[in-house]
Amino acid sequence: MGRFLLALPLYLAMLLTAAAGPSMSSAWLKITVEQDECIKHGKEAVQENSFNTRFEVLGNSSIYGERGDYTALVRCAAEMNMAYFVIAGPKGDAASRYMNAIRDRVTAALSGSAPAAPSASEKSGSSSAAINPSQSSGLDDLPGQYSVAGVNPNGSTYRGEVTISEDGGVYNFRWRISNGDTFRGKGRLRGRILSVDWGQKYPVIYHVDEDGTLRGKWANGRASEDLTPNR
């Protein structure tokens, strides 16, 4: 397995960089699902982000597609509990946006959240992989105060408040739980998916509903949390 993990990024990098250009963005994701489910969500993520040219599933292990000058490849290795994502193309910032959008789409699907379909501009080949918040209902005024209702991995429930502030595209979270615990985290919005790193092994993955409610999964999908805006 060690040889596979070392060789896979190099192999994919060589494949995609040769096909699409000098810039590449990559990431891996720990998964606990079967191979077919990983492939299913990988296919949906690649197609929903408009990588439909020369789209192909290779041997029930990899999903390949092109979007203009950019190429995408998702490699599922359920036997090793991992999925690997690579985007290559002429501009590094665009490759990174596309990679994050595809990875976050798969992450959200595996955690039980369902992100919105891509916008019309994305389907037509726009260079941005994320929905423009100013044009999307429920995304205009994320900063503010929220009431928290959550379920822990052991099934117990909790309540509290969350304050969300925004600074240069980064959303800062501060949780105040009714038992006195406080937590802090930071995240970025990709479409309607907001992934928040709060210092634990797994992030909190929220889906932003049109009414502004954030519905999240944490602890690798074993726990949930809803944030209701206090407006």
Image (cartoon, grey):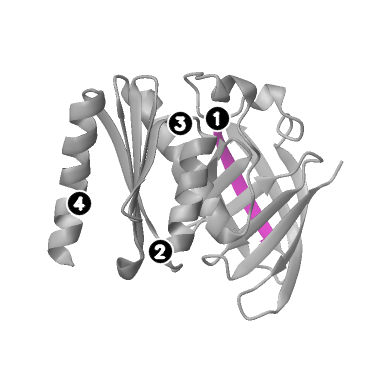
Kindly identify which residue carries mark 2: 35
Answer with mark 4 or mark 1, whichever residue precedes in sequence. Answer: 4
Q: Crowding at label 2, few (<14), some or many (≥20) Cα neighbours within 10 Å?
A: some
- Circle 2/circle 4 CB separation < 8 Å: no
Mark in front: 4 vs 1: 4
Kindly identify which residue carries mark 1: 130
Q: Secondary structure at mark 3?
A: loop
Instruction: Please state which amino acid type lies under the numbered disc 2.
Output: Gln
Q: CA distance from mark 4 to mark 3?
A: 23 Å
Answer with mark 2 or mark 3, whichever residue precedes in sequence. Answer: 2
Kindly identify which residue carries mark 3: 52
Answer with mark 2 or mark 1, whichever residue precedes in sequence. Answer: 2
Tell me the quarter of the picture where residue 181 sits: bottom right
Q: Is residue 32 above or below residue 114?
A: below
Tell me if residue 200 can be seen: no
Q: Secondary structure at mark 2?
A: helix
Q: Position of residue 18 (x, y in %)?
A: 18, 28
Q: Is residue 108 magenta?
A: no
Instruction: Please state which amino acid type lies under the numbered disc 3.
Output: Asn
Tell me the quarter of the picture where residue 133 sits: top right
* Quadrant placement of the N terminus: bottom left
Q: Secondary structure at mark 4?
A: helix
Instruction: Please state which amino acid type lies under the numbered disc 4.
Output: Leu
- Circle 2/circle 1 CB separation < 8 Å: no
* Main secondary structure found in the magenta portion: strand
Mark in front: 4 vs 3: 3
Q: Which residue range is magenta in the image? A: 168-176
The foreground one among 82 and 41 is 41
Q: CA distance from mark 2 to mark 3?
A: 22 Å
